[in-house]
Image (cartoon, rainbow, N blue to C red):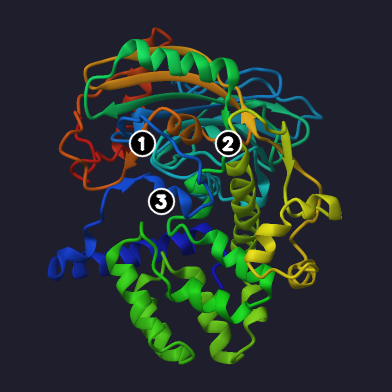
Amino acid sequence: MIKNSDQIFALWQQEQIYLQSVKEKHPELFVKKPEIEETDTLSRVGISMPFIDRPLGYLKHHPFDFIVEEIQKNGDVSTVDYAPFTAEPVGDEQRTIYADLVKVGVSTVDAVKELCRGLSIEERQVGIAGIKDATALTSQRVSIRGVSIESLSGAQFASLFLKNIHADKGAINIGDLLGNRFTLFIRTEQGINQDDLMDKINDLGKNGFWNFYWLQRFGNRLLSHWWGLLLFQGNYKEVVRSYMCDPGPRELPAIAFARQEAGNDFGNWEKMKNILSPFCYSLRHELILLEYLSKNPNNFLGALKLIPEQIKLWTYAYASYLFNRFLSTYATNHGSYTAKLPLILSPDQRDRQLYQPFLAADRIPKQFEQNIRPFNFIRFARREVKTRVIPIIHGVKILSEGIIISFDLEKGAYATTFLAHLFTLVSGLPVPEWVKTKEYDLKETLGTGSLKETKEKLKKYIIEKETGEESSE
């Protein structure tokens, strides 16, 4: 069982050595198609609303093209602007350190692991309000318990720095935020009609946008909701088989090929381990299942209980998928819609009845909670989600290379959902030939600050999209 961040980092290093050796012999297994959010891709996750007249827009060519700054409950913004280390005196009753964590090119989960490595603490000592994008420059408030401010002053971290350090009581929990401020550069294929674009942005700022759960909710294989559906059915064996063996449209071909090869030997756990074990980091959860099944053949439920975080993601992804399907019926109704919808994981039978046609089509039993109850970490609670969200627009700048836009969204809303009402989004490698690669300081261009010092601090960890190599600037 993988226990700490050092072990996980060691697995990553081991896998990178293997991948490099394979890439030298079979470079074709490392070529992915650009990710284009077209109608058929959206329909995979339950979004059937027709989006029309949307030019192509490429996202995240450079990590500094996508800036996320957390808005605290009191309205303060944790900015990405660099500030040198300073710390206020600590009172006798102040046992928690608070700081703004600014990171680039890594997920919040990995940033927390790096923070713990640098401070020699456990992950349970760190509190966060939410998960921020990996391929981005982001800032968010964190709480750290059981450390001194003095220990922070000499600590070294990769891909991140801390600022606004102070001591107080309590700790940060998931959901302890008001929303997020986004400053984004969408690189466009062709010139954009400024009047048309501003009309659309002003309309969205006034009337809001359809609050679909967007693609990142469904994992890099866009299959998380499918595994959730199988859990709702109680088909634990098929969950295990699909999770280990079914490739996804956005997966590295080298890994997709290994999954398919392992699928040919499903049930031969030792042989499957031999096939998948070289991908000891990317497929570490799959290998946990295989290790258990090699000792407990056919106990698929027992195996799944060993990966609770994945089970949570799949269950909530299926709830999101149902929400998207239901919301799509409203979005195509041209006006008539309800302000909020409950999610399926509600104990109230009236809430579940809303989704009954979809549940029946998916062959989900009415008492599906019996299939979910074995996973006692899944909470059944009533939660309503807004069907439309109104963004607060701070600034728009149209350039020859694309559009820079800054806006606030309340917590739980996706920036990509908002952008998808304006563009057909494209991301990933290889970068399309039409993408213009000139780099901008987004804050300086909008007149809201400068990224110069932040970039200088983090430049070692910036990965250039077009080369796949570290920046030498």
The earlier-in-sequence mark between 2 and 3 is 3
Judging depth in this view, the residue of 438 and 122 nearest the camera is: 438
Q: Which mark is residue 424?
A: 1
Q: Considering the image in quadrants, where does the N terminus appear?
A: bottom right
Q: Nearer the viewer, mark 2 or mark 3?
A: 2
Q: Residues within 10 Å of mark 2 (few under 14, many from 20)?
A: many
Residue in view at x 19 percent, y 69 percent = 21
Residue 397, picture quadrant? top left
Judging depth in this view, the residue of 213 and 449 nearest the camera is: 213
Q: Secondary structure at mark 1?
A: strand
- Residue 366 as seen in the image, left or right of residue 86: right
Q: Mark 3: which amino acid?
A: Thr
| x and y percentages locating residue 142 in the rendered image | 62, 35
The earlier-in-sequence mark between 3 and 1 is 3
* Label 2–label 1 contact, CB within 8 A: no
Q: Which mark is residue 41?
A: 3
- Residue 66 as seen in the image, left or right of residue 317: left
Residue in view at x 80 percent, y 28 percent = 92
Q: State the separation of the CA atoms marked 3 and 1.
A: 11 Å
Q: Which mark is residue 331?
A: 2
Judging depth in this view, the residue of 372 and 447 nearest the camera is: 372
Q: Nearer the viewer, mark 2 or mark 1?
A: 2
Q: Considering the image in quadrants, where does the C terminus appear?
A: top left
